[in-house]
Amino acid sequence: MSEPALLPLVASLVDTPLPVSGIAWLDAMRRDNREVFVAGGLPLARVEAWKYTALRGLARRPFVDGDAAALTRAVDLSALALPGVDGARLVFVNGAFRADLSALGALPAGLTLQPLSQALHADPDPLRFVLSRRHYEADEAFTQINAAHARDGAVLRVADGVKIDAPLHLVFLGAPAEGDLAWHLRNVIELGEGAALTLVEHHLASGEQAHLSTVVGDIELREGAHLHHTVLQQAANGASLIRRTGLRLHARAHATLHLAELGGALVRHDLRAELIGDGAQLETRGVFMPHGRQHVDTQLAIRHQALNTASSSTWRGVASDRARGVFRGAIVVAPGADGSDASLSNKNLLLSGSAEIDTKPELEIYADEVKAAHGATVGQLDERSLFYLRSRGIPLAEARALLTAAFCRTVLDDLPNAALREHLSSLLIDQLPA
Amino acid sequence: MLKIENLHARVEGKEILKGLSLTVNAGEVHAIMGPNGAGKSTLGNVLSGRDGYEVTAGTVTYNGVDLLALAPEERAAAGVFLAFQYPVEIPGVNNTYFLRAALNAQRKSRGEKELDSMQFLKLVREKLKVMQISDELLHRAVNEGFSGGEKKRNEIFQMAVLEPQLAILDETDSGLDIDALKHVADGVNALRSPDRAFLMITHYQRLLDYVVPDVVHVLAGGRIVETGDKSLALKLEAHGYAGLAERQPARASA
């Protein structure tokens, strides 16, 4: 049942001593997760949630735990900036917090933004509940690894009723090192009742490398809280990046997520949202554009658990060359979540005969008076549209680029930050094959 | 300007055009009428270069050039415009952006200077006035959510901006109510000029009440079976298309 512990990835993880914090519950939690991982091993294709993302290649590679030189890696500060993102900034390089690159001066009242390592050192108790969650499922191996090994991450809290205007910026940068590194980051984000925040999460690389990183985040939105969250993933072309984001929305909380998955060699994101309070609302808008030999897998799971909750998800995939995209969009409307409204659309384009996209929408409804719509397609550019553009004088290559860009950009339509939207839009266009 | 000789074309292996000949001179408006299945739309599609239409015999010469050898975008740049029977909706592509990209692509291909956004806007405003189109249409995606009438008017508006030499109108009148039909006709009439020719493909005579053609052809069974002046259209209206397919091909009008 378990993967032989001889696999180099597993061996390098098991051989790595766990971090020791001196906080009893935390160290016990780390040991506990290590044991669960050792017993269960890596998820293989027979685990449904990993069916389309084979880990054989990754498992054959050993990684060095953490980067001893992380604090001295040279990073071009200007490369971290994003248009329209001018609030406080927290920067991690190869998994380590970099105070010198961060911008944490003069935080607005009611905003807490600090690295997890500092938060634990100052007062671990508020983090105990969220960090003590157990992840026993077979598809949660990387969450177990993360729980056992993560030393740092972002801790972000907005107090009740506080509205933060300037978009906050979380930067996770991978820098070239002497070998292939592995690091693990754990983020904890909480918006108090009626709080509001715009958050930009940026994964990027300062050069070519083939590191492995895992990022686990919990985002809790209390009653009436409002979050705009944009994720720009531009990991290095050789990097493996495995993320799990858990989102919990209390009554009348509202979250709008925009995600652009552009980089990485092996990318996996589990995005699990629970609408646990009446009237909670969630929008997810995402685009994944694997090219070359990239493999990008998004697993979206939305659970409606309260009355009159609403979710709307629009995802676009564009795969070129020999790349592979995977999308699973699962919506569950639980018993009692009457009056819920759920919609999900995933449309995909294959720009080459060797590219592949597997998409799987799932809908389970156990409540009454529910509105639900979902659909998924995989195809090529519409020949009629191409001909229409060409008949007006637009050359074939330009017509293709125009239609493909329009196809992806749909997911940015309701991103309110115009400067960021324009920037993302140009990144999407740059990502298209010439 | 346009000389079609003995044109044979197939769609999905089925021969639709069977020896069509036609000559259109600059400044003329030709109407091509005919029953369903006669090959009217096939003619428009062959002339604009749509995939899936295989020319098996005959020639099409446009201003001395072999039109059939050109890609669709090259035909457009050379001044050929097709107003679609079913204009395509293109979500995510802004109407103004699209039109400017089209105009500049054509200008570039002709070796002309591209228009900057100010120059383009000025041109668009002039044309909007002539076409009596609300500029709200410009801010929407190409044809997305347009009514049938708006789509057809958008075709004529594009034609006004692109200023083709040869405009082919494929059943532009179909599906229009009388007001929309008049708007479309006004637009076409405003563009009539000694340098420009029109080929109006239509099933019904009523568009011809508003855009009076110089020459009327009857297309049946993949050939021009009769050619005359505007009175031919009225005759067809009175007697219908019945029996046309059996007639011998008429001599192409010169």
Image (spheres, coloured by chain):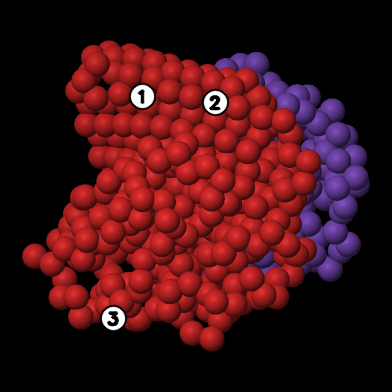
Q: Nearer the viewer, residue A128 or A409?
A: A128
Residue sitting at 83 percent across and 42 percent down? Answer: B193
Q: In the image, which lettered chain appears red? A: A
Amino acid type of the residue that numbered disc 3 sits on in the rendered structure: Pro
* Farthest residue, direction bottom: A178
Q: Which mark is residue A276?
A: 1
User: Percent from the top left, x then y, of residue A317?
Assistant: 44, 54
Closer mark to the observer between disc 2 and disc 1: 2
Using residue A43 as the reference point, say whether residue A149 is left or right of it.
right
User: In this rendering, is residue A248 above or below B168?
Assistant: above
Q: In the image, which lettered chain appears purple? A: B
User: Percent from the top left, x then y, of residue A418?
Assistant: 72, 40
Q: Earlier in the sequence, mark 2 or mark 1?
A: 2
Q: Are marks 2 and 1 in contact (CB under 8 Å)?
A: no
Residue sitting at 64 percent across and 71 percent down? Answer: A71
Q: Which residue is mark 2?
A: A192
**Where's the C terminus of chain B, which quadrant?**
bottom right
Q: Nearer the viewer, residue A303 or B62?
A: A303
Is residue A62 visible in this depiction of the protein?
yes
Crowd around label 2: few <14 · some 14–19 · many ≥20 (10 Å): many
Q: Give the CA separation, mark 3 to mark 2.
A: 43 Å
Q: Which residue is mark 3?
A: A8
Amino acid type of the residue that numbered disc 1 sits on in the rendered structure: Ile
Q: Earlier in the sequence, mark 3 or mark 2?
A: 3
**Where's the N terminus of chain B, which quadrant?**
bottom right
Amino acid type of the residue that numbered disc 2 sits on in the rendered structure: Gly
Element under disc 2: loop
Q: Nearer the viewer, residue A130 or A228?
A: A130
Residue sitting at 90 percent across and 45 percent down? Answer: B118
User: In this rendering, is residue B232 above or below A368?
Assistant: below
Using residue A223 as the reference point, say whether residue A3 is left or right of it.
left
